[in-house]
Image (spheres, rainbow, N blue to C red):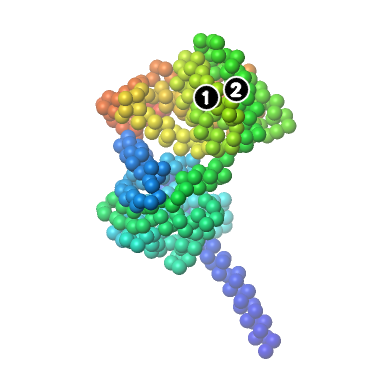
Amino acid sequence: MGCIIKLCGLFLIAIFIAVPVTIAMNAIQDRPALKRPGEINLQDLKNAQQLAKRYDPRLMPPERITEIRATTRELNTVLKGVMGSLDNVATQVKAARFGVLVGISVKIPETSLGQYLNIRTIIASSSRGLRFFKMYVGKVEIPRQFIRPALRYALDNLVGKGKADPILDSVRAVKVLGPTIYVKFQPPKNLIRDLKTAAQKRIQVSSPQAVKPYYSLLDKLGSQQASKSKVSLTQFLRPLFKLAGKRSVSGDPVKENEAALLALSLYFGDPRFERFVGKVLTPQQKSSRKKLSQVRLNGRHDFVQHFAISVGLALTGGENAANIIGELKEVKDAAGKKSGFSFTDIGADRMGVQFAKKATKGRSKALEFQRVISTVTSERRFFPIFTDLPEGMATAQFRKRYGDVNSPKYKKVISEIDRRIKSIGLYR
């Protein structure tokens, strides 16, 4: 009898060990199920921009159902922009006769089992809300009755306790016709506020305490330079990174550079970057924010704005997302009555991205960056000439000269921009 009990005990232990191991072995794979999205063309960018504008959730009243219509190409373009900052993640949406296929491949630290977590789910066409037909993690099929609880757990942790069910229930119907997906959506109350709060918690790059000293310095420098007709941004960068160097003696130079750059983005770019830091500006600083149109790069103030905003985007969203947003802005300008499509602006955008990337690439690089920028006297030490590049093109003119944003002619100009950036010793 004792032997039987021991055998039963060993059998149960084996099950408890073997089942998780078997699941893990089949869930983690050695290859990604999805490749990172391919190139986006001009029409893709315009469609994604129009889609975001057409279905802005801030304009959707919670008391009314809105039907959202989008092609899989539009959705994948938006996903590429949203997920662009995550080099280890690939996503894809496909339309099928029976529903919508959503896939994600995540590169994880390498293990003996593999290096990729592949998740696929099939959302069924339904007039009765969100219905999950199947879900797979690697080769493991998740039982249907466990899919919603798993999503509820994930959303409650991401957005906030009790927020998952209203979000899942906000999808009232799903329909697929060819490559077009139709979703009837009734947003829960405070959806945007909840998502913003969740994003701020997870994308918080620095802290108000770290950024405030740098912003106060920029504010002081702005008052000192206010009477001048033209001032190079170097007059602000030099003291900003001298301060970063001093604070790095007892602190982390990467964190100090991040704080200095975020202050730069807030002061010269957009105060909305404060969302990813916390409350930095005092009421007095908000009311007294100056345009400082006399501050220039390549002799132009708009370059300062492009540069500062791209620095902030690179820190909060990553290199890929920042570059895509820069292109989207130019596509919008080309279609509107503003400045038109300008490679000069893209040059300033990409320069801001590389500036932020270099400043925060490890301790030794961050210290080297501080030494260079804190003594810089010429813009050529960190910012090349872009004013000779084509600019001010309306959509028709752009198409005539370059065709699309993935054409050889277009790529040649982008390659030239990147070559000019890399020609500067700081970025080699």
Disc 1 element? helix
Which residue, as the protein is rendered here, is positioned at the far bottom? 1
The answer to whether residue 91 is seen in the rendering is yes
Q: Nearer the viewer, residue 18 or 377?
A: 377
Q: Is residue 44 above or below residue 297?
A: below
Which residue, as the protein is rendered here, is positioned at the far front? 63
> Going 42% across and 34% down the picture, which residue do you hit?
325
Residue 385 in the image, given as x and y percentages of width and height: 46, 18
Q: Assess disc 2: are there few (<14), some (14-19) or many (≥20) residues with their C-alpha within 10 Å of its C-alpha.
A: many
Give the residue at mark 1: 268
Give the residue at mark 2: 218
Instruction: Decide if residue 334 is on the left or right side of residue 91.
Output: left
Q: Is residue 24 above or below residue 53?
A: below
Q: Marks 1 and 2: in contact by CB < 8 Å?
A: yes
Q: Nearer the viewer, residue 261 or 269?
A: 269
> Which three-letter amino acid code belongs to the residue tagged 1?
Phe
Disc 2 element? helix
Q: Nearer the viewer, residue 155 or 35?
A: 155
> Going 57% across and 18% down the picture, which residue do you hit?
222
> Going 55% across and 22% down the picture, which residue do you hit?
288
> Which three-letter amino acid code belongs to the residue tagged 2?
Leu
Image quarter (top left, top right, bottom left or bottom right) of the N terminus: bottom right
Instruction: Decide if residue 338 is on the left or right side of residue 379.
Output: left
Residue 315 in the image, given as x and y percentages of width and height: 54, 35
Q: Is residue 219 above or below residue 46?
A: above
As drawn, the label of residue 296 is none
